[in-house]
C-alpha cells in the first residue's frame, strides 16, 4: 500500500508521487485531514508525543498529515532536505527571519523585492532591531560591500518584480558562503519547475504557494525549504507563533504541484511569444522578459532558468494615460495585481503594487508611469494578443 518509492526519481514523477502516505483505506488520491487535534491511546502516549519522545501528530498548529504530504512533495521538487509550510508567502519570509535572527542582526536584500517583503525587512523588522541594507542585486560587488560583522541573512528574488531583473544565484551564494551568511531565494516567479536555487548554492528557498504552486488562484500558502538545521528552527517559531498552513490549503497546493511543470512550460512558451509580439508593436517602448535576447541578463537567465518564466512587463509609449488605455481596453485579461494563475492578469504597478512609494523611488527603481505587467496564463496566446492590441492600436 505504502510501497517505498524507488530512489533517484525524476522531478515529473516526484511531482505526482512524493509525499503520498495512504491510510488503512488504501485510498488512491491523497486524503485531506480536516482535524485540529489528534487523540492518544493513553496518558503515557500523550506525554511521549508532547515531549517528542514518540513521533506522532499532536495539534494542527504544529503539523497535520496533509500538510506533511505537501511539505515532503515540495522539498523533493526543490531538492531540499526538508520543508515547512506556512499560511502565506509573507509568513514564510517572516518565519525564516524570526528563526534565523535576533536584535542587532543585519540583512542584505535586493532592492527589487515584492512590496510587502520590502516593508517587512525595511519597516517591521527594523522596529525590532534588525537592520536591512537594500542593494542593486545584479551587481555582485554590492552584496560583498554591504556585509557587516552582524550580517546573518542575504535575501533575493529572481526574476524580480516587476522588471524581471535576473540575479546571479551562484554568484551571490559564493559571497554568502565566504561571509558565513545564510542565503535565501524567493523562488515564487520560476518555481522548481524552472529554477532550483538550492542546486545553485542557495541555503534556503521561500515560496508564496499562493502563486504558481497552487496555480489556479484558490488558496494562500507559503513554504520554507532547505537544510533540516534551518527548517527545524523555522518549525520552532511556527509551532509557537502559529502562522501554520491549513490542511485544506495544503491539499489544494499538493494537487497543484502535480501539474506545475506542464503549466509553467505552457505559460512560459506563451509569455515568450507574447513578449516577441509586444517588442514589434509600435506603441511599445520596451519589453522586459528574460527569455528575450534584448534582456540585459538574458545569457545568465538561460543558464540559471529552464525558460524565461510567465511574467512579461513592458513600457507603453505615452505614460500613464496610454498604459491605462491598454488596461481598460482588455476584455479577457483580468485587471488584478495577482499572478501565477491559469487566467492571465494585467497590472499597472505605478498606481497599484508600487503606488505607495514616492515617485522618485519609483523612478530610481525604473518603474515608469507607462509600465504594465502581465502574468501570462493558459489562454490561447492569439486571444491575449488581440486583447492587448485593442488598447495599443489607437
Ligand atoms: C505574492 C508574493 C509574496 C507574498 O506571498 P503571499 O502568499 O501573498 O503572502 C512574496 N514574494 C513574491 C515574489 C510574491 O509574488
Image: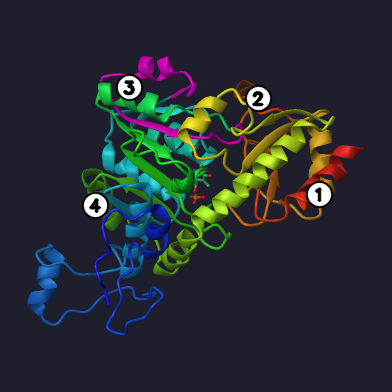
Q: What is the CA distance from the residue labelled 3 to the residue labelled 4?
A: 28 Å
Q: Residue at x 46, y 33 (%)?
A: 304
Mark 1 = which residue?
387
Tag 3's secondary structure? helix
Q: Quadrant of residue 29?
A: bottom left
Mark 3 = which residue?
175
In this view of the protein, which residue sits in the foreground, 81 or 273?
A: 273
Select label 1 or label 2 by which is in front: 2
Residue range highlighted in magenta: 134-163
If you read the primary sequence from the N terminus, does the residue marked by circle 2 or circle 3 appear first? 3
Q: Determine whether 67 is above or below 309 in the image.
A: below
Tag 4's secondary structure? helix
Q: Quadrant of the C terminus?
A: top right
Q: Residue at x 45, y 42 (%)?
A: 187
Circle 1 packing at 10 Å, graded few (<14), some (14-19), many (20+), is: some
Mark 4 = which residue?
236
In this view of the protein, which residue sits in the foreground, 338 or 118?
A: 338
Q: What is the CA distance from the residue labelled 2 to the residue labelled 3?
A: 28 Å
Circle 2 packing at 10 Å, graded few (<14), some (14-19), many (20+), is: few
Residue at the far left: name it.
44
Res 201 seen here: yes
Residue at the far right: name it.
394
State the image coordinates of residue 379 (x, y, percent, origin top left): 70, 56
If you read the primary sequence from the N terminus, does the residue marked by circle 4 or circle 2 appear first? 4
Amino acid at each position: 500500500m505504502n510501497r517505498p518509492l524507488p530512489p533517484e526519481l525524476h522531478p515529473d514523477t516526484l511531482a505526482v508521487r512524493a509525499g503520498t502516505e495512504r491510510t488503512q483505506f488504501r485510498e488512491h488520491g491523497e486524503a485531506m485531514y480536516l482535524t485540529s487535534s489528534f487523540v492518544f491511546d493513553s496518558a503515557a502516549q500523550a506525554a511521549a508525543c508532547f515531549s517528542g519522545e514518540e513521533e506522532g501528530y499532536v495539534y494542527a498548529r504544529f503539523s497535520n498529515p496533509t500538510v506533511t504530504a505537501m511539505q515532503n512533495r515540495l522539498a523533493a521538487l526543490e531538492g531540499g532536505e526538508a520543508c515547512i509550510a506556512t499560511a502565506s508567502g509573507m509568513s514564510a519570509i517572516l518565519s525564516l527571519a524570526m528563526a534565523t535572527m535576533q536584535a542587532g542582526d543585519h540583512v542584505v536584500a535586493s532592492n527589487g523585492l515584492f512590496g510587502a517583503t520590502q516593508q517587512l525587512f525595511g519597516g517591521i523588522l527594523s522596529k525590532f532591531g534588525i537592520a536591512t541594507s537594500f542593494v542593486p542585486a545584479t551587481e555582485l560587488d554590492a552584496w560583498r560591500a554591504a556585509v557587516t560583522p552582524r550580517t546573518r541573512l542575504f535575501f533575493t528574488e529572481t526574476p524580480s518584480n516587476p522588471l524581471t531583473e535576473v540575479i546571479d544565484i551562484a554568484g551571490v551564494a559564493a559571497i554568502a558562503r565566504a561571509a558565513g551568511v545564510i542565503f535565501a531565494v524567493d523562488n515564487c516567479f520560476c518555481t522548481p519547475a524552472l529554477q532550483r536555487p538550492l542546486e545553485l548554492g542557495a541555503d534556503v528557498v521561500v515560496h508564496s504557494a499562493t502563486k504558481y504552486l497552487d496555480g489556479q488562484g484558490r488558496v494562500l500558502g507559503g513554504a520554507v525549504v532547505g537544510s533540516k538545521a534551518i527548517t527545524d528552527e523555522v518549525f520552532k517559531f511556527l509551532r509557537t507563533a502559529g502562522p501554520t498552513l491549513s490542511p485544506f490549503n495544503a491539499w489544494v497546493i499538493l494537487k497543484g504541484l502535480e501539474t506545475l511543470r506542464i503549466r509553467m512550460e505552457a505559460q512560459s512558451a506563451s509569455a515568450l511569444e507574447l513578449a516577441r509580439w509586444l517588442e514589434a508593436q509600435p506603441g511599445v517602448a520596451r519589453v522586459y522578459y528574460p527569455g528575450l535576447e534584448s534582456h540585459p541578463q538574458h545569457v545568465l537567465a538561460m543558464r540559471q532558468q529552464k525558460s524565461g518564466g510567465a511574467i512579461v512587463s513592458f513600457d507603453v509609449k505615452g505614460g500613464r494615460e496610454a498604459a491605462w488605455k491598454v488596461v481598460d481596453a482588455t476584455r479577457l485579461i483580468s485587471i488584478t495585481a495577482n499572478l501565477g494563475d491559469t487566467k492571465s492578469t494585467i497590472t499597472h504597478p505605478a498606481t497599484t503594487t508600487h503606488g505607495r512609494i514616492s515617485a522618485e523611488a519609483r523612478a530610481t527603481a525604473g518603474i515608469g508611469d507607462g509600465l504594465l505587467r502581465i502574468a501570462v496564463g493558459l489562454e490561447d496566446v492569439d486571444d491575449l494578443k488581440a486583447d492587448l492590441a485593442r488598447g495599443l492600436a489607437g
